[in-house]
């Protein structure tokens, strides 16, 4: 029997990211941004629980990355889309980084991750908001 986890957020990138990048795609210069947004919308999924952060992505969603809160040392977030969605970067203790792009409700999720990190490590993670 597995360990129970309570999901705080489960889903994909914000739909506004896709819409904005499709509108920008009408200019030839922004076509790479549009392709990136379409791929994210199709295959990228996030699952943030009380135990870990899971990112499923890659070609046809075949890659999965799990990070437990005890490994997180720094959290950085930046607003996009007039603050409706944002990006979060988790820096791990070994120096690796995990990027969460176009997260809806990113402020709540960033605070949630910071709280869980403080619970697991006993030390508050460095939280940077831009």
Image: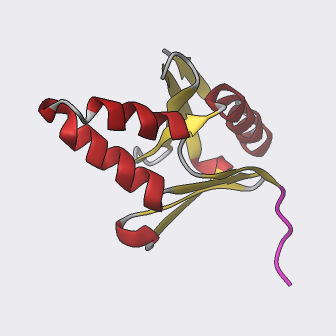
Is residue 90 visible in this depiction of the protein? no
Q: Position of residue 6 (x, y in %)?
A: 84, 57
Q: Is residue 34 toward the left or the right of residue 118 in the image?
A: left
Span highlighted in magenta in the image: 1-6
**What colour scheme was applied to this rendering of the protein?**
secondary structure
- Identified at 48% across, 14% down, the residue is 130
Q: Hey, which quadrant is residue 73 in on the image?
A: top right
Q: Position of residue 122 (x, y in %)?
A: 76, 37
- Majority secondary structure in the magenta region: loop
Q: Hey, which quadrant is residue 26 in on the image?
A: top left
Q: How many marks?
A: 0
Q: Is residue 129 magenta?
A: no
98 over 88 or under it: above or below = below
Q: Is residue 5 magenta?
A: yes
Query: Who is closer to the viewer here, 121 or 105?
Result: 105
Q: Is residue 57 toward the left or the right of residue 123 in the image?
A: left
Q: Residue furthest left?
A: 28
Query: Who is closer to the viewer here, 52 or 72?
Result: 52
Rendered-image quadrant of the N terminus: bottom right
Q: Residue furthest bottom?
A: 1
Query: Who is closer to the viewer here, 24 or 124?
Result: 24
- Identified at 66% across, 48% down, the residue is 69
Is residue 95 visible in this depiction of the protein? yes
- Identified at 76% across, 41% down, the residue is 116
Q: Is residue 36 toward the left or the right of residue 81 in the image?
A: left
38 over 109 or under it: above or below = below
Q: Position of residue 38 (x, y in %)?
A: 37, 51
Q: Is residue 45 toward the left or the right of residue 123 in the image?
A: left
128 over 62 or under it: above or below = above
Q: Position of residue 81 (x, y in %)?
A: 48, 22
């Amino acid at each position: 029997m597995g360990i129970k986890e309570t999901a705080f957020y489960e889903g994909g990138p914000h739909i506004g990211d896709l819409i904005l990048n499709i509108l920008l795609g009408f200019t030839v210069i922004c076509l790479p941004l549009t392709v990136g947004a379409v791929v994210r919308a199709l295959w990228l999924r996030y699952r943030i629980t009380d135990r870990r952060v899971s990112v499923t992505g890659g070609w046809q969603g075949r890659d999965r990355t799990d990070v437990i809160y005890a490994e997180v040392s720094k959290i950085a977030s930046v607003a996009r889309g007039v603050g409706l969605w944002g990006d979060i970067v988790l820096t791990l203790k070994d120096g690796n980084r995990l990027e969460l792009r176009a997260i809806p409700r990113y402020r709540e999720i960033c605070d949630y991750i910071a709280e869980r990190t403080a619970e697991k490590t006993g030390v508050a993670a460095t939280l940077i908001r831009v």
